[in-house]
């Protein structure tokens, strides 16, 4: 009987969720991609957010009990477009910071998971609330997790208009930006 209690205690100890921190660094990154329309159809704006932090509570025994929170410094946005001049690159970045994200009023974006559904082979569907410009909206992300390295990778798409953002355009609409944005991330959770 003592052996059974000892084994149950050891099993319970290993079954506890583990808290990890998520911090910017290394090769990790959070990116946002937006397709152009009109004369620039086929081009994309590529933005990265090098400053972010968060927490992952991972339950290896019952992954559905796992949770993640992420805070992204909106003001850290960097435009990575290689198809525009340096002058236009600065304009695009300034427009994204001041008009699209309004970082002076909304300095960060947040994601808080509400549901984690295991899909098999270390893949998960993560539902949660993404808050941009103070507006929290539900989003779903497809996420992979390498349990050996605790690297998380994922992708989600959502519309600017859902957050009260009008897709930028110029030249009376001859050059524009699609409403849909695609966010991708590769982050590492550490104890």
Image (spheres, helix red, strand yellow):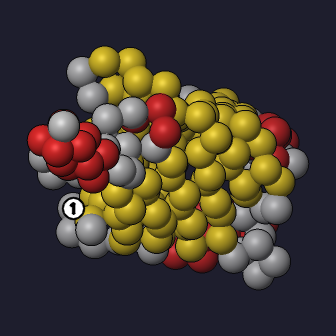
* Residue 129, horizontal then vertical, whole percent: 69, 45
Q: Give the residue at the far bottom of this rendering.
A: 104
The reply to whether residue 79 is in sight is no
Q: Say what secondary structure mark 1 lies in.
A: loop
Above or below 74: residue 14: above
Which residue does the numbered mark 1 point to in the structure image?
27
Q: Quadrant of residue 62?
A: top left
Within-10-Å neighbours for mark 1: few <14, some 14–19, many 20+:
few
* Residue 2, horizontal then vertical, whole percent: 17, 44
What residue lies at 50% left-to-right and 52% top-to-bottom?
A: 68
What residue lies at 27% left-to-right and 65% top-to-bottom?
A: 190
Above or below 119: residue 64: below
Q: Quadrant of residue 63?
A: top left
Quadrant position of the N terminus in the picture:
top left
14 on left or right of 166: left
- Label count reads 1
What residue lies at 43% left-to-right and 54% top-to-bottom?
A: 57
What residue lies at 79% left-to-right and 61% top-to-bottom?
A: 133
């Amino acid at each position: 009987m003592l052996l059974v209690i000892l084994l149950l205690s050891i099993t319970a100890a290993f079954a506890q969720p583990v808290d990890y921190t998520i911090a910017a660094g290394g090769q990790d990154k959070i990116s946002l991609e937006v397709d152009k329309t009109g004369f620039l159809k086929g081009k994309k704006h590529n933005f990265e957010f090098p400053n972010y932090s968060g927490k992952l509570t991972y339950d290896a025994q019952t992954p559905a009990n796992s949770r993640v929170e992420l805070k992204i410094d909106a003001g850290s946005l960097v435009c990575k477009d290689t198809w525009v001049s340096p002058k236009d690159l600065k304009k695009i970045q300034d427009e994204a910071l001041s008009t699209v994200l309004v970082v002076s009023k909304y300095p960060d974006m947040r994601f808080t998971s509400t549901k984690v559904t295991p899909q098999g082979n270390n893949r998960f569907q993560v539902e949660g609330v993404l808050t941009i410009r103070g507006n929290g909206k539900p989003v779903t992300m497809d996420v992979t997790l390498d349990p050996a390295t605790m690297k998380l990778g994922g992708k989600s798409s959502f519309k600017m208009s859902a957050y009260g953002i009008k897709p930028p355009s110029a030249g009376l609409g001859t050059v524009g930006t699609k409403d849909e944005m695609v966010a991708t991330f590769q982050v590492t959770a550490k104890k």
